[in-house]
């Protein structure tokens, strides 16, 4: 109804329209509530899916890490078997040694390389095993960086390679190079340090593995300058000539092994 002049307006709304409006409003409210509930459920599912994806990625990383650890442990076991062949089949490292070697093999990065002072606590390592096959000697071997061909130290040979087929335990599986105590001993070829420690017979002992399948052994050292798993080049200082272990005078006991068999180093050594 207007305030001043004019005809009043009349609106008529049927009861059915009102009912229809109420129904539409009710349906819209229900739809809105359903959308809110469904959206919340979807967001929760998305959150759970993302969390499960992250956990699955972490589990996959852990699984891969376990696989890598198993691979490295197998490699360490192979190194241990090779060292046993060099030192003798009766060699049995202590639990502490094995734990230390496994920790080093599984650690990230290269170890530091400070000089290692001579140890006063002997480790159970027997005398070098005697060859089970005929002596290996091939004069036609090409002298390369993977062949132990460099004289490890300056001096003179006080005892040569000796093989006693009747009494193998009396064999001398390497050569003795007499020299001045403290003289630098160098790697005979490129390789990796697979053993450093104390031997009851050879005192402070270093063993290198070479890519050609050879091993070189350096015994009776005064001081060890390298650590296991360290890579060394041909001519790298690895220890100092000494008089440790079962030794009566300063000298280097030098052995070369091919697989599980010691050979005479002399045919391999060159002057350069």
Image (tube, rainbow, N blue to C red):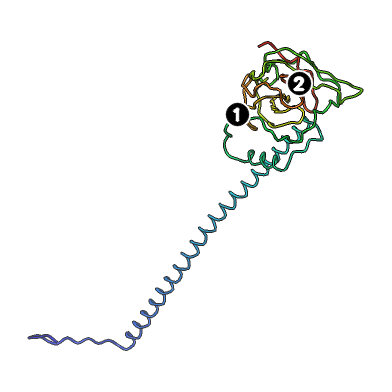
Q: Which residue is mark 1?
A: 115
Residue closest to the far right: 166
For label 2, the crowd category at 10 Å Cα-Cα, with few meaning under 14, some 14 to 19 and many 20 or more, is few
Alpha-carbon distance for marks 1 and 2? 24 Å
Label 1: how many residues lie within 10 Å, few (<14), some (14-19) or many (20+)?
few
Q: Residue at x 34, y 82 (%)?
A: 21
Determine the secondary structure under disc 1. Answer: loop
Q: Residue furthest left?
A: 4
- Pinpoint residue 243: horizontal percent, then vertical percent: 71, 23
| Of the pair 68 and 255, the residue shown nearer to us | 255
Q: In front: 163, or 71?
A: 163
Find residue 248 and name its label. Answer: 2
- In depth, the one of 43 and 138 nearer the eye is 138
Q: Position of residue 254 (x, y in %)?
A: 73, 21
45 in relation to 169, above or below: below
Q: Classify 101 as above or below 25.
A: above
Indicate the quadrant containing the C terminus: top left, top right, bottom left or bottom right: top right
Asked if marks 1 and 2 touch (Cβ < 8 Å), the reply is no
Figure quadrant of residue 260: top right
- Give SS at disc 2: loop
Q: Position of residue 202 (x, y in %)?
A: 75, 27
Which of label 1 and label 2 is nearer to you? Answer: 2
> Is 48 on the left-hand or right-hand side of 87?
left
Residue farthest to the bottom? 15
Which residue is rendered at x = 63% and y = 41% of the image? 106
Which sits earlier in the primary sequence, circle 1 or circle 2? Answer: 1
Q: Residue at x 67, y 14 (%)?
A: 154
Q: Position of residue 131 (x, y in %)?
A: 84, 25
**Quarter of the image where the N terminus is located:** bottom left
- Of the numbered discs in the image, which one, if any, rests on residue 89? none
Q: Nearer the viewer, residue 184 or 42?
A: 184
Relative to 29, 207 lies left or right: right
């Amino acid at each position: 109804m207007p305030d001043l002049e004019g005809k009043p307006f009349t609106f008529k709304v049927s009861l059915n329209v009102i009912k229809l409006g109420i129904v539409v409003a009710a349906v819209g409210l229900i739809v809105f509530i359903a959308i809110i509930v469904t959206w919340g459920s979807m967001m929760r599912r998305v959150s759970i899916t993302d969390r499960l994806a992250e956990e699955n990625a972490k589990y996959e990383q852990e699984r891969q890490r376990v696989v890598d650890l198993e691979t490295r442990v197998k490699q360490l076991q192979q190194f241990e078997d090779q060292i046993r062949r060099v030192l003798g089949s009766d060699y049995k490292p202590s639990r502490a040694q094995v734990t230390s070697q496994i920790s080093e093999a599984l650690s990230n990065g290269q170890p530091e390389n400070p000089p290692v002072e001579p140890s006063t606590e002997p480790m159970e390592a027997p005398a070098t095993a005697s060859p089970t096959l005929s002596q290996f000697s091939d004069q036609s071997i090409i002298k390369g960086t993977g062949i132990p061909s460099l004289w490890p130290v300056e001096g003179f040979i006080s005892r040569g390679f000796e093989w006693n087929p009747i009494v193998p335990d009396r064999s001398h599986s390497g050569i003795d190079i007499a020299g001045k105590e403290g003289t630098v001993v160098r790697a005979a070829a490129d390789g990796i340090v697979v053993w450093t420690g104390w031997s009851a017979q050879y005192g402070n002992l270093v063993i290198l593995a070479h890519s050609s399948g050879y091993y070189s052994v350096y015994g009776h050292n005064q001081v060890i300058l390298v650590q296991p798993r360290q890579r060394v080049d041909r001519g790298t200082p690895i220890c100092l000539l000494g008089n440790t272990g079962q030794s009566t005078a300063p000298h280097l006991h030098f052995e070369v092994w091919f697989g599980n068999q010691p050979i005479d180093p002399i045919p391999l050594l060159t002057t350069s």
